[in-house]
Image (tube, coloured by chain):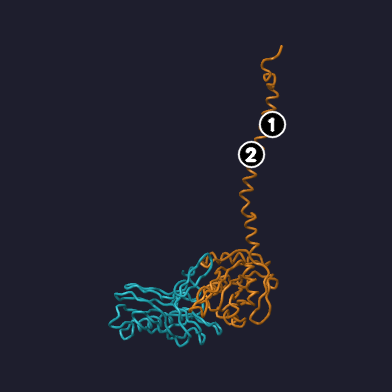
Amino acid sequence: MADPFPELEEEPSPQRQAEGLKTLRLALWGVVALVVGIGLVAMLAPDRSPQQATYADLIGGPFALTAPDGSRVTDQTLKGTPFAIFFGFTRCPDVCPTTLSRMAALRKQLGADGDKFRIVFVSVDPGYDSPADIGRYVELFGTPILGLTGTDAEVNAAVKAYRAFYQKVPTNGGADYTIDHTASVYLMDASGKLQSIIAYDETDANALAKLKRLVG
Amino acid sequence: MIRITLAAALLGSTILLAACNEAPETPAATETAASVIAVTEPWSRETAEGQNAGGAFMTIANTGTAADRLTGGSTPVAGRVEIHTMSMDGGVMRMRQLEDGLEVPSGDEVTLKPGSFHVMLMDLKQPLKAGETVPLTLTFAGAGTVETQLVVKPAGEMAPGMTHGEGGKPHG
């Protein structure tokens, strides 16, 4: 006689039911483990997300410029010592002296550690600032600062390597110019890799903490 | 200690200069001018040889009844004088010449300071040395010319009377 309810025959025995529950429990734990795993990955991700890694890797890179004494300075010759690099020009009335003197003051606050990093100033106005001019300019700040510039092409390559910006702006009816430029200080570690950036409007306390990390 | 004394001396000298500027005999205002201009604490930053421009900062008060406008000026140490403004835009410093000058409303004052408005001394004929004073004649649309003496301070100075390298964060 045909069973009118064939599915009932499929109903598991208590033993099979227990095994089923065990399987279900394992499966659920598997789901829990998966969810926790995804959560952990999501939490840890910011440290190694492609975006951040790319950002740090994007800034800095090959450049070749000339020091006040005429010697050549490149990303390779700077390797081995962390450095703080800033782009500007000597006819900059405000941001450049403010930033360089601030770096000098912060270096003093670091005490003995202040000697563990270089301050590098790159003039983006090579048509006006000769390497010797830049050497005299950086001496105003009472601390060793490496003043650099180069040909237009060399300066442009360095600016591009740091994803920085500068642009000449006409003044005096086009007879003269001033220069808009990035006002941030890039902190590069001993391997030449970006560690952090000091923004112009950042507090001295923040900037000092970043420098401590740079030389630590 | 020396620095503090120096700062005090500089501050003292700027106050004296301010007093000079506010004295009635200064050509701050004519009888017909409706604006009355007083310039206090004019200062500039030291420059290096080959650095042919410098910024000058000060407070300009207008106690008159009409608005006035700082349009330019002259100084024996520079080829020309421009009025500029500065702003930060996404990490980029932008400086612009104020072609129409800088307005000083009546009954108000405008402070020219790092990170903001400044007078640019262009084509410097000689470096500005810390501790020196430099004559600067300012030209106003209403009040005419106003004579000032810029006190030259160290390159890193942020404000008149402040000591070098201290303070919380850059102004502006």
Residue at 52% of width from left, 70% of height from top? B93
The picture places residue B100, in percent across and down from the top left corner, at 41, 75
Task: Name the secondary structure under disc 2.
Answer: helix
Residue B140 x, y percent position in the rendering:
37, 80
Q: Chain of mark 1?
A: A
Please state which amino acid type lies under the numbered disc 2.
Val
Q: Position of residue A37 (x, y in %)?
A: 65, 44
Q: Are marks 1 and 2 on the same chain?
A: yes
Badge 2 local density, few (<14 within 10 Å), some, or many (20+)?
few
Q: CA distance from mark 1 to mark 2?
A: 14 Å
Q: Residue A29 falls in which quadrant of the image?
A: top right
* A192 or B54, nearer to the observer: B54
Q: Which image quarter holds the C terminus of chain A?
A: bottom right
Q: Chain A rendered in what hue?
A: orange
Res. B1 in view: no
Q: Which chain is cyan?
A: B
Q: Position of residue B155 (x, y in %)?
A: 51, 79
Find disc 1 in the rendering and name its residue.
A23
Q: Within the image, what quadrant is residue A28 found in?
A: top right
Q: Amino acid at mark 1?
A: Thr
Q: Residue furthest left?
A: B31
Q: Which residue, given by chain and number where applicable, does mark 2 sit on?
A: A32
Task: Say whether residue A7 is left or right of residue A88.
Answer: right
Up the image or down, A142 lies above or below A33; here it is below
First reached walking from the N terminus: tag 1 or tag 2: 1
Q: Residue furthest right?
A: A1
- Whether residue B80 is visible here, answered yes or no, is yes
Crowd rating for badge 1 (residues with CA inside 10 Å; few <14, some 14–19, many 20+) = few
Q: Is residue B118 above or below residue A188?
A: below
Q: In this orientation, which residue lies closer to the viewer: A103 or A169?
A: A169
Chain ID at mark 2? A
Q: Quadrant of the N terminus of chain A?
A: top right
